[in-house]
Amino acid sequence: MLGFNLRLQSFASQFKNNFKSISLNGPAAISASTSAAIARGFASEIQSAPITTNAENDETTTHNITTSVPLGYSGTVQAWLRDFKTNMPRSIVNIDKTVFDTQIRVDILHRVVCYERDAKRQGTHNTRGISDVRGTTRKWAIQKGRGKARVGTHRAPHWRGGGIAHGPKPRSHVTQIQKKVWLMGLRSALSSKFAQDQLILVDNLNLDSYKTRDLFSILRGNRWINEENERSSGRVLFLPALKTVEEQPETQDMYKNLLMAQRNIPGVGLMNVEDTEVYEILKHEYLVLDKLALDYLQRKLCVE
């Protein structure tokens, strides 16, 4: 019992020292050495936080991040809004907790993935039965007198070149699932990406050129692809709001450039946010959303 009390006192003093390293008087200063768990725990109480990080040249770089989070409000969580080309943080955005920080249901993810993959099956498999194969229907040998087994047509399944017994025929593999279950699976998929720090929020997906090498240099600079094998699968999925910007002609070109540039890079996909699938989100390692797509997902998946 005495040893347990000593360990408890040691833990309490260590936690007290870590707590004193964070100053919440006025603008809070959270150093890069502070653990990510403590930083996230105090994120909802920070109004204006100068984030200090160490650059490569050992100089101190300060980013003034401002956000308006109501104190005591637990319906949102905070995430970085990054620059697409440099992957550097630009601001902090509040995202819905019921969409991006909900319980991850593995059983629901399994049901939704099976449902989506079943819907993609063509079901065009076809085999020829005894009435479909080519050949005569005459009796192949006399019934009696041969000393052998009775035989009929050579189109029977047990003959070489005969039909297939109980073979697959064209059919639909579509299964049914409730809409609420599918929406729950989408929330779980987004929450899993957010929990693994694989959800990347960018201000826009503006790409100046449709050249593949320009997008490839951005992906390599942001470390979204494998550095050892540049031609290997990077597993990046872009989810822009394509249909949302149809009424804005000035923004159509940037999505057109992104669509053309990503086609020659293995493992990099682009899908309209309104057509997103749970299977595609889980298959790719990184999920990149712009602000329009983020607003659409929060409107669609928000739980009151």
Image (cartoon, rainbow, N blue to C red):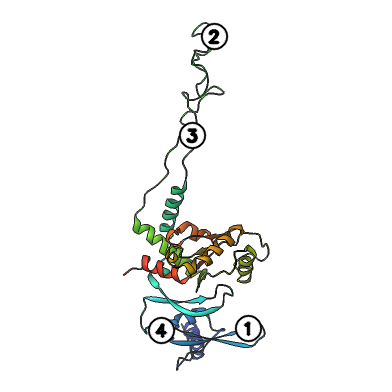
Query: What's the amino acid at mark 3?
Result: Asn
Query: For mark 4, does the 10 Å Cα neighbourhood hold few (<14), some (14 to 19), or many (20 or more) residues?
Result: few
Which label lies toward us, 1 or 2?
Answer: 1
Residue that label 4 marks: 68
SS at mark 4? Answer: loop
Separation of residues labelled 2 and 3 (CA atoms): 38 Å
The amino acid at mark 1 is Ala
Alpha-carbon distance for marks 4 and 3?
61 Å
Q: Amino acid at mark 2?
A: Gly
Q: How far apart are the alpha carbons under marks 1 and 3?
A: 62 Å
Tell me the residue that label 2 is attached to: 147
**First-in-chain label (4 vs 3):** 4
Q: Give the residue at x 52% y 58%.
A: 283
Res 289 visible: no
Residue at the image position 59 percent from the left and 64 percent from the top: 210
View extreme (front): residue: 249
Rendering coords of residue 60 (x, y %): 61, 88
Q: Residue 202 in the image: state x and y as whole percent.
A: 51, 73
How far apart are the alpha carbons under marks 2 and 4? 95 Å
Please name the residue shown 42% across and 42% down the image.
172
Q: Position of residue 32 (x, y in %)?
A: 56, 83
